[in-house]
Amino acid sequence: MKYILYPFAFIFYLIQKIRKFLYSIKICKRYIPPITTINIGNLSFGGNGKTPHTIYTARLLLNNNYKVSILLRGYKRKTRGFIEVNDDASVIDVGDEALVYKRNFGSLVRVAVCENRAKGIRILLDKYPDLDIILLDDAMQHWRVNSHLQLLLTDFSNPFFRDHLFPVGQLREPRRSSKRADIIIITKFPSIFSPIIFKNLTEKIKLYPHQQLFVSYISYNKLKLVFNNNKNIEIYDTKPYAIFVFTAIANPQSLNEHLLLMCKDLIRFNFPDHHQFTEKDVIKLKKAFNDYPSANKIIVTTEKDIPRLELPSIKKYLLDLPIYYAPIDIRFHNMANNEYNYDKYILDYVRKNQKNNRIFKE
């Protein structure tokens, strides 16, 4: 079947090639922002962990007294143009990822969506001229902006060097486009570091001299209730539970593996990335949950899914169910890079390259 798709992959490749050529000969102009912009992106269509790594990086910068903004496209929103995310924004207005950022940082980080990132950066700088850094979520293929630092994330279970160009695989660009990255992060690595596995990956990635390689993994925290008025069922460490996983993320593999350690039966309701849940979806979930013979059962989703579950038309079906989400933290295997750890690299880069930075001047 894949062989049939190769001609379409070649057409997709030509389209990307033409776009890059137009920018290279300056028919299409690139915008260089006047303050440091860090792009957190990937070569594939999703599931590499951009959202939690953006949160990690924003928190790192905040903790070092930098004023930070996050700008993203706002995928699957029903609006267009620049919108700054406020407390009243809905997933329809700004998309699910923007609301996750707002949920994590509140007023500490200016979060905005704009499909034209160059325009979005200009508006943010007009409104907040004291900003130090703008983090761009998923802008590696957004050629209109020339970011100062490029981060390429690639999933341990499906790294870009094993993938193929869409529609044969999930790549949005050829593998050699990884050369544009300053940092490559292998995400979702096993929590126990293996030098042998790491060495094997390093040999296959074939870093360029200007690149640094880091390795991160997911640390799951204790489950939390999605809605405060849900049934507060105690979570035990034993395995009496059936867990209904209800999520729409690109790659739920690591979540499923984590939940399997907590229960005897995992019932999966997995949907495509950013899927807008329908009443039919949640009614089906509710029926399956109520029909399940065990009383020791819960529903688990992700933080990224919560904004779509909070829509009134969906939420009303879930208020009497024990529905939790699995909070995660990103952690780095520092032994993977002898010269730098991730935090040090980012902070050193910002201090050395942000000429107009308040802290740099001090």
Image (cartoon, rainbow, N blue to C red):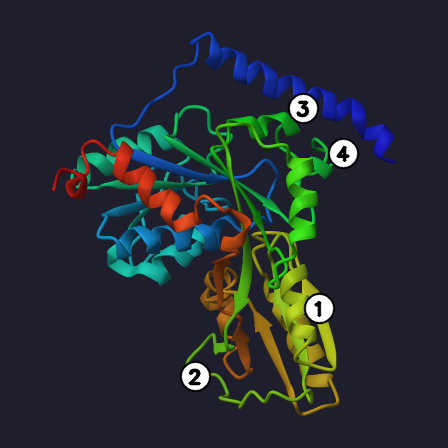
Is 196 placed above or below 23 here? Answer: below
Dot 2, crowdedness within 10 Å: few (<14), some or many (≥20)? few
Identified at 69% across, 87% down, the residue is 239
Q: CA distance from mark 2 to mark 3?
A: 48 Å
Query: Could you tell me the amino acid type at mark 1?
Result: Arg
Query: Of callouts 4 and 1, which one flags the residue occurring earlier in the amino acid sequence?
Result: 4
Q: Secondary structure at mark 4?
A: loop
Residue 199, percent across and down?
66, 45
Q: Do residues under tags 2 and 3 come within 8 Å of each other at their CB atoms?
A: no
Identified at 29% across, 45% down, the residue is 69
Is 165 placed above or below 102 here? Answer: above
Give me the disc on residue 12: 3
Give me the disc on residue 268: 1
Dot 1, crowdedness within 10 Å: few (<14), some or many (≥20)? some
Query: Could you tell me the amino acid type at mark 4?
Result: Val
Q: Secondary structure at mark 2?
A: loop
Q: Which residue is mark 2?
A: 229
Query: Could you tell me the amino acid type at mark 3?
Result: Phe
Q: Which residue is mark 4?
A: 168
Image quadrant occupied by the C terminus? top left
Residue 106, percent across and down?
29, 60
